[in-house]
Amino acid sequence: MKIVVLMKEVPDTWGDRTLDLETGLLNRAGSDLVLDEITERALEVALTHRDSNPGTEVVLLAVGPATVPNSLRKGLAMGADRAVHVHDDALLGADLTLTAETLAAAIRHIGFDLVVAGNLSTDGGGGVLPSMLAELLGVAGISSLSTVEITDSTVAGRRNIESGAFEVSAALPAVISITEALPDARFSNFKGIMAAKKKPFETLSLADLGITVDENAGRSIIIAVAQRPARTAGIRIEDDGDAGQQIADFLIQNQLIKGRS
Amino acid sequence: MTAYPANSVLVLVDVSPAGQLRSSAAEVIGAASTVGTPVALAVAAPGNADRLSAELAALGAGYVMISESAELDTAVVSPLVDALSAAAAAVSPEAVLVSNSIQGRDAAARFAARSGSSLAADAVGVSRDEEGVVAHHSVYGGAYSVDSAAAAGTLVITLRQGSSSVRAAAQDAETELLAVAASGAPDALINSYEETIVASSRPELRGAEVVVSGGRGVGSGENFALVESLADALGGAVGASRAAVDAGYVAQTLQVGQTGVTVAPQLYIALGISGAIQHRAGMQTAKTIIAINKDADAPIFEIADFGVVGDLFTVVPQLVKAIESKRG
């Protein structure tokens, strides 16, 4: 079985994340770039399946600029078999539709039985790409799985939505996205890090994938970007025994005490 | 066949497997009404059309389309996507608006991919300029506002739940029963569904005007009664930090933050929450923030309008008592 895992490089949520106010694009120079944690969990799902199913190939796939290979090495060190990086200047500022078309073409190029992705990236937070890919690839898609069971011909699991939970299954090939209810990713060891350097690493351009960027196609464009003023600290007190009363007074002054609804 | 206005905004509303409108329906129809004429589309099991069309008209839909589908019991998403495609063909909408629920965004994503439309995901508002419909986004935990629009064609927008308070006036809607040709696109199979029973009388976290959240500093699941007592005194919802969820104090559904629920209430009270950047990303657009923490260096104080360095187990009961006595 061939499992393609979608990896995303994002600015580390523990640091400053800034947008270029001219272009609306991530200011990469001002951010620590890391693999999105949820995509590491997606990789863990694939590696766990391979642990008990020899003959499984786990392929990492990412779209992004020249920094991406450094991030993908981490996934290779964790145990993925090989990596594919789609890198093309024409993808700068790509919207969801172009990104989905590019990923779908790369997945077809790689070949797949199962595509595993995280449910929501920490930067865009759209949560739509896995479903777009399922549609473009013409296969079943299941989003937001909190458990995953993979067999030779099916994928199944529990799909949690806001108000309940489905037990669902689909025939392969399929696309799934997983939530952080699934286990944390394994650590890479020294041996894995050394092995990662020798693993196959393929770089593809849009031309390799047969994609031409059509300026007149239905694309989403950014038309304005603004930075909100940062919040500043207000009043701060040490409790001398009347802090509860002081908060109540603050709430009353600001008309924040309402009746029970 | 009904003629739809040129400024139609096609709104796919969320319906539960039992055929009930989700609470997000009022929000998406309300938001759509600010940029055009809302045409509400509901996909439900057969026998629900009359009731749903009356409910959708009451929420402000000028036109209602109902697709009755017997496949909903077993098919995860294709009945919704097929219905959206059929409705869009009939309406030629300027924009398609869907709640950014898990179900809604799956349907919107597949529809956008199928129709080659541009997609604006997780918008927090919509407006109109001279060139058409604009989606507003809140990026990096509210640090930036970004506007997006379609370069050409229909813009498909998913609207973050609880982000818009606009509600539309009731309409006398024309209803069309939509005939949908199944695409036959591969889909996953539903083997069972279990609705989460909400026994709480408290408001839902998503969209609540007041949120009281507890963190690791609350100490235990039992101690969360203290958080609940303050939430109840203020008529608010209960939330939690990731640390409290990871420690097993409360269910993951209460998690506020980047990977949980994003809230933007009038009042947010953080109890025993240090204020990790991921938590702040989910709540820092609250109008007023109050924090109680015994650690004077907790980052939550950097964004709190009123911060108390103290023991929440003495401060909160006093606060609850003061609120109760004020309200009489």
Image (cartoon, rainbow, N blue to C red):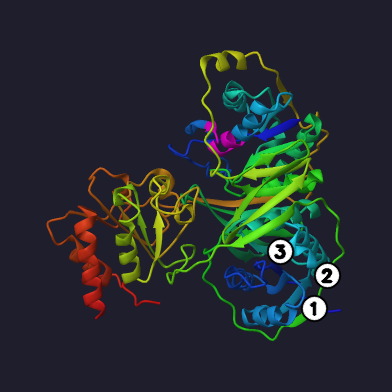
Q: For the residues labelled 2 and 3, say whether their Cβ atoms are less than 8 Å apart.
A: no
Which residue is pictured at 45% across the width and 56% down the height? B254
Q: Amino acid at mark 3?
A: Ala
Is residue A109 toward the left or the right of residue B216 in the image? Answer: right
Q: Chain of mark 2?
A: B
**Residue B153 image point, x, y percent:** 77, 58
Q: Earlier in the sequence, mark 3 or mark 1?
A: 3
Is residue B8 toward the left or the right of residue B218 in the image? Answer: right
Q: Earlier in the sequence, mark 1 or mark 2?
A: 2
Which residue is pictured at 40% across the width and 44% down the height? B277
**Residue ID for mark 1:** B176
**Residue A216 image point, x, y percent:** 79, 49
In the rendered image, the quadrant that contains the N terminus of chain B is bottom right
In the rendered image, the quadrant that contains the C terminus of chain B is bottom left
- Residues in magenta? A34-42
**Residue ID for mark 2:** B90
Residue B95 disc label: 3
Using the image as rendered, state which of residue B312 and residue A224 is in the foreground.
B312
Q: Which label lies toward us, 3 or 1?
A: 1
